Image (spheres, grey):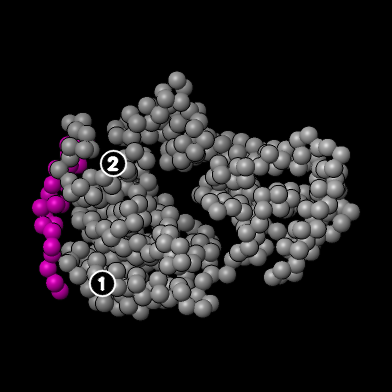
Amino acid sequence: MSGFAIDWPGASRRAKHAHELLGSSGTGVAELPLRRDVRESWKRSLESSAQLCGPSVLSDDHLRLARERSELQRIWPVFEKLLVPAAADSNLLVALADAGGTLLWVAGGNGAMSQAEGVGFMAGADWAEQSVGTSAPGMALATGSGSQVSGAEHLYEQAHHYSCSAVPIRDPRTGQVIGAIDLTGGPEAIATHSLPLLQAAVMAAETHLLLPGAGVVADPDYLDLGRSDGAHLGSVPISLRHAEILTLLAHYREGLSTAQLVEELFERPDAAAAGTVRAEIVRLRKVLAGPGGRSLTSRPYRLEWELHTTIGRLWHALERGDLDTALPLYSPGLLARSQAPGVVALLYRTEAALREMVLDRGTAHQLLNLGRQLADPGLLRAALRELPEQSPARSLVVAEVQGLEG
């Protein structure tokens, strides 16, 4: 196969020296002898306190659920057809990662797959920069550009025998990065032709997403409160007030009277509050009567079907002690604009329960993740206790704690 545009052996030798400098001399990342994009990735990874001891891996059930929910399920067959046969013949692997860095599918020769599983490169594994440090899929997701990583340029030592190329995948309707396609293996994975090959496959996959019926149909019984563009019931955007009402009715399965809804929705209700609630219920019923034909009873107001919500799924995960599922569901932006007392109280209880469980059993990465979202010095101090003494991230976390505590 074709040659190499970069002096990869030289890059890998310099990267090995960079590891030695980082571990022994206190040399700053900015001074390390690395390619610029790799050096920037090392910096991002270390600042996020990547564990560098191997990726976390989803259980089979969680992997199946992640695949079912992902829009990438529609385009994996495109990559299977265009990339996997040739990759398998060259003893390479093709991996499709979601926007968070989890490898949803990995395919290639059986021998290559078995060997890669030994370093955690497998379906369900988290290869985001903040998880295992620098890798081609992690870089592609972080930068939105094609990336290549050779041998010791990986921060994760067990990956030094591998090289990889990756290209981000974008939703052609919004331009948003929704995943990355990766080629991993020996030196052939970073040959000159590798990035153009991946880019051509991505173009075909993105075109496939535009075909009628190619998109994923959102679950009509799911109230998604975690989207940056507002709450959605299935694929239908809904108002903040309707999201508040549905959140409360999903939580109080036995239903709520008009008076109870007034109490849950208004901090200082006036004489018109009951009429306002009734008017909102009328409008909400029109929304629910759309696709799916869901209904809402009166006296009390009660949902006649099982509505799943982001908060509800988060609580179910906490009840199982499943932080790997709970943490991605949480965001400080969940109904952040809500001033409804009942919703604010529910969010407070949810956040407090999540915080306590992370303090009790969370990894350093999980403690840092939530601590930074909440700007919580207690969580960050707990993360410091979990971080290895030699971790380059410790000084950064100490500075964060000092900044929060004034």
Residue at which label 2 appears: 43
Towards the viewer: 50 or 176? 176
**Tag 2: residue type?**
Lys
Q: Position of residue 294 (x, y in %)?
A: 75, 66
User: Which residue lies most toward the front here?
Assistant: 272
Q: Could you tell me how far apart the alpha carbons at marks 1 and 2 are, in whole angstroms?
A: 29 Å
Quadrant assignment for the N terminus: bottom left
Q: Position of residue 341 (x, y in %)?
A: 73, 38
The numbered disc on residue 57 is: none
Q: Which residue sits at x=32%, y=78%?
A: 82
**Tag 1–tag 2 contact (CB < 8 Å):** no
**Tag 1: residue type?**
Leu
Mark earlier in primary sequence (1, 2)? 2
Residue at which label 1 appears: 197
Write down the region rendered in magenta. 1-23
The local crowd at label 1, few if under 14, some if 14 to 19, many if 20 or more residues have their Cα within 10 Å, is some
Q: Position of residue 43 (x, y in %)?
A: 28, 41
Q: Position of residue 343 (x, y in %)?
A: 70, 42
